[in-house]
Amino acid sequence: MKTVVLGMSGGVDSAVSAYLLKQQGYNVIALFMHNWEEEDNGCCTAEQDFEDVKRVSEKLGIPYYSVNFAKQYKEKVFSYFLDEYKRGRTPNPDVLCNREIKFGPFLQYAMALGADYIATGHYCGIDHNQDGNHYLLKAADQNKDQTYFLNQLSQQQLSKVLFPLANVPKQKVREIANELGLVNAKKKDSTGICFIGERNFREFLQNYLPNQPGKIVDTNGKVVGEHIGLMYYTLGQRRGLGLGGTTEGQGRWFVVEKDMENNQLVVSHGDESVLNSTSLIATNVNWIPACPGKQFTCTAKFRYRQSEQGVDVNVLDDGNVEVKFHEPQRAVTPGQFVVFYNDTCCLGGGIIDKVIK
């Protein structure tokens, strides 16, 4: 019997994944990851989550363990998160958490426990192909597909993984959990970044990065207000600018640009086409399993909650990529990931470094 160590979070997806793996004849071990130490002020709900892991595991009759990766998380993920905000960018720590923790130390720990495979409750699939390559497949439930967050995984990391929810719709997951009487059957899906939790994002960042207030200007350079620090704003943002409406009646102000050199937040109102861009340059590009070619056409996402968009990709001599959009794209944001797709697979992705109007 093959042994699978499953990353169990306390949520319904990983709980049902454990059940499905057991039904498939695997010896399943649940492993809960504790990735953040500071749980004051309603941050992570790790204690309650682990309690749910225990109750689900006991219900399913599988052993469970807890492991602390907080040190690795701060070094590999949180430090990156802070560095990106210092640069005025908007990072996606969930992508790095997968590459650096869930498929890094977690994988090593699982192998030490005697695992043949690891598994997670991600909505995606894996094809351990006879050609020796491992392909990251889109989930059958396209509304829940989470390949975006796994775009940085290597062939080695994917070689030992199973994704039990590849062909299971979210609604079916809830139904199975209800039928089994699992304690987390109706538990809400987690959203946002674990180490911030329900706390105010600005207040959290202020604990780690000093405020650098500056001027808010319109696209003509006219001062219209003051910002509390460029790191607290994202492209296209409307709320929290403190500017109210507009005297011309042309709609609310929204963020157009973060001018780091002059510490100015550039805003506009009315025509949102100023947020559009035609191409981007991406760095730190990872291909699964290999780059499709020097130049090719595929689809891409520039944020998780977005439909795939047609693009032309040009691989540059330094390994970075130029991505030209078939249609102008709104509020493409440096620091986020561009992730590439074909009909069935996630091809990989990279960090959006420069956006071209």
Image (cartoon, helix red, strand yellow):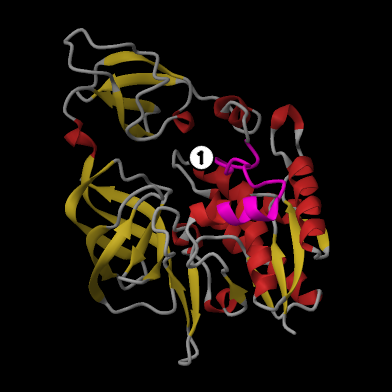
Q: Is residue 343 left or right of residue 240?
A: left
The quarter holding residue 258 reads top left
How many numbered markers are drawn?
Answer: 1
- At a point 59% along the width and 43% down the height, the residue shown is 190
Residue 208: give x, y in percent of width and height.
64, 33
Circle 1 crowding by C-alpha within 10 Å: few under 14, some 14–19, many from 20: some
- At a point 45% along the width and 54% down the height, the residue shown is 144
Most extreme residue toward the top, as rendered? 247
Residues rendered magenta in the picture? 175-196
Residue 183: give x, y in percent of width and height.
72, 46
Check disc 1 and report the residue beneath it. Answer: 85
Q: Is residue 193 magenta?
A: yes
Q: Nearer the viewer, residue 110 or 87?
A: 110
Q: Is residue 288 magenta?
A: no
Q: Quadrant of the C terminus?
A: top left
Q: Quadrant of the N terminus?
A: bottom right
Q: Is residue 120 left or right of residue 217?
A: right
- Residue 4 visible to an observer of this rendering: yes
- Residue 67 visible to an observer of this rendering: no
Please, what is the three-letter code of the amino acid marked with disc 1?
Answer: Tyr
- At a point 64% along the width and 76% down the height, the residue shown is 24
The quarter holding residue 209 reads top right
Secondary structure, mark 1, is helix
